Image: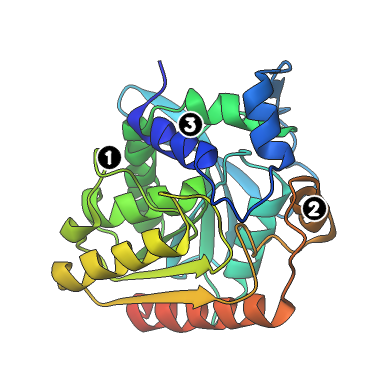
Amino acid sequence: MTSQGSRFLTKALFNRTKSTPPSTLSLAILSGSLSQVRAMASDAAASSPFKKVQIQRDNGTFDAYVIGKDNAPGIVVLQEWWGVDFEVKNHAQKISQLGSGYKALIPDLYRGKVGLEVAEAQHLMDGLDWQGAVKDIEASVNWLKANGSKKVGVAGYCMGGALAIASSVLVPGVDAVVAFYGVPSPELADPIKAKAPLQAHFGELDGFVGFSDPKTGKDLEEKLKASGVPHEVYFYPGIGHAFMNCSPEGAQRRKKMGMDDEDAAAVEQAWSRFNSWMGRFLSN
């Protein structure tokens, strides 16, 4: 059964603004053509700079991928709906090198599966236990704090951005949050109850209504004002959803989904703001 969180995002996908032309994403969802989901090989990270660890949650464990300095402040980095793919690893590696260095950790919310096509990613997200994902985040925060990180932040993109905001509401011990273009459903977590300092980023051309469009971002900003937590909400003109995905592979994937906008200066500005925010709240 589709969870409340994924139903909320699916609704946003169907209600994109009329100014946004139908993309590969919406056409794939409407066609209902789901190909078989590929399982990610267990040794996929062997040739990368990431270390795979296992984290305890309830009566089981899940894999996570760690990069960065030991004993540095930690940042849990949350995937988009694709899974633990090249782009979220790019982001985590970048984060590990910001400022004086961070220990970045990517929890594998999909338990080894990765969507290689939009229909697969939609299928994986629809099957996600969002409350369970929040528990994964809490276990990841606790693991970092037990392994040398005195303070821990959470950052996420798209689906992961929504979960990052949810962590500000639901996960004790989170010291700061940065969320990119994603807001959780009120059923999962209401940002008016946020407890951790929160920074959020949105593209002004983002057409995912009710999830990451500018109005949703403005509504988030009003709720954060009411929450009383330190917060910053930024809007970037001329760019749409997933604008931080600027690797050659990520840019090509965005173009296939009908997102041709690119703005390197906006990406660098967002990273600078990220660095300042995490540095402010995670300094030991």
Amino acid type indicated by mark 1: Leu
Give the residue pinned by disc 2.
255
Q: Measure the alpha-carbon separation of dots 3 and 1.
A: 22 Å
Question: What x and y, as percent, mark residue 22?
Answer: 69, 42
Q: Is residue 126 above or below residue 82?
A: above
**As drawn, 28 above or below 16:** above
Q: Quadrant of the C terminus?
A: bottom left
Can you tell which of label 2 and label 3 is closer to the viewer? 2
Mark 2 element type? helix
Image point (62%, 57%), residue name: 242
Question: Could you tell which of marks 2 and 3 lies nearer the N-terminus?
Answer: 3
Report x, y in % for residue 157: 53, 55
What's the residue type where badge 2 is placed?
Lys
- CA gap between label 2 and label 1 equals 31 Å
Of pointers 3 and 1, the one earlier in the residue sequence:
3
Depicted 98 relative to depicted 30: above or below: below
Residue topped by disc 1: 188
Circle 3 is placed at which residue position? 62
Question: Which-is-in-front pick, marks 3 and 1?
Answer: 1
Q: Are marks 2 and 1 in contact (CB under 8 Å)?
A: no
User: Could you tell me how many numbered marks the image carries?
Assistant: 3
Q: Amino acid at mark 3?
A: Phe
Residue 108 visible within the image? no
Circle 3 sits in a helix, a strand or a loop, which is it? Answer: strand
Q: Residues within 10 Å of mark 1 (few under 14, many from 20)?
A: some
